[in-house]
Every structure is written in C-alpha cells, then in structure tokens.
Image: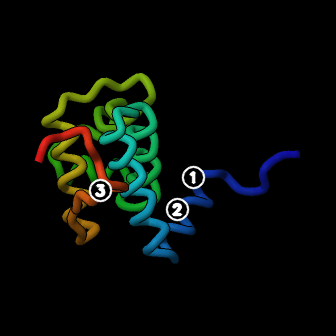
Amino acid sequence: MPLTRDFKDTVKARAERDPAFRRGLFEEAIDAFLSNDTETGKLLLRDYVNATVGFEKLGEELDKSPKSLMRMLSAQGNPRADNLFAVVGHLREKEGGSFVMQPDAPSTNYAR
C-alpha cells in the first residue's frame, strides 16, 4: 500500500505543530551520536534540519554550502568533528535548549 504523504512532509508538519516532537527528534540524534551510532545520529539530524530550518538557510547561517551540509549528514557522510559540532551547536542555540548529562542508572564503571 503506497504512502499517502511523503515522510519528510509528515515529519515537517509534526515538527511545526509539536515543539516536544521537534526537540525529541534533536535529542534522539544527539543521543545516537553519544551512543556511538553516528549513522543514525546523522540521519536523525538530517531529518531535524529538513523539518526545521532547512539546508539552504542553515548553509547561509553557517556560511557553508548547503550541498556540503547535506552530504555531511548523509549515510555515507564523514563529517569532521568541528563541522558537526558547529551544526549541532547552532541548532541547539536556535532550539533554545541545552544538554544535560543524567545517569540512566548507578554506574560502577568509574571510580568516585
């Protein structure tokens, strides 16, 4: 059965009307990066950019080529850390949030 709406359009519409969904998409991307799942993190961040600011505007704001940013966040992309952090930091600032590390459960991996 074919989809009645394009996935990007559906995500964009939901992100526009639901700030919690939009922030959740961004948080999931960051969590994927921090969990060493860079492929998922890049794709989720790409979805977030498409659903919010768009690559053209992001490119203008960061003084970078939109095509370069799209490649960077593709499945085959291999972004340098400074470029990736520039994108993440800029989007975090636009979203108006911050990141806080909270333990999931007591950890015995590190000495106190």
- How far across and how far down the image is residue 92, in percent? 24, 60
**Marks 3 and 1, how far apart at CA:** 33 Å
Q: Earlier in the sequence, mark 3 or mark 1?
A: 1
Residue at 56% across / 67% down in the picture? 13
Q: Residue at x 42, y 31 (%)?
A: 39
Q: Amino acid at mark 1?
A: Lys
Q: CA distance from mark 3 to mark 2?
A: 31 Å
Q: Amino acid at mark 3?
A: Pro
- Identify the residue under disc 1: 8
Seen at 13% across and 36% down, the residue is 82
Rendered position, 110 above or below 53: above
Could you say which is closer to the camera, residue 34 or residue 66? 34
Q: Residue furthest right?
A: 1
> Helix, strand, or loop for circle 1?
helix
Q: Which residue is mark 3?
A: 103
Amino acid on which disc 2 is placed: Lys
Q: Which mark is residue 12?
A: 2
In contact (CB < 8 Å): disc 2 and disc 1:
yes
Q: Residues within 10 Å of mark 3 (few under 14, many from 20)?
A: few
Image side of residue 59 versus residue 19, left or right: left
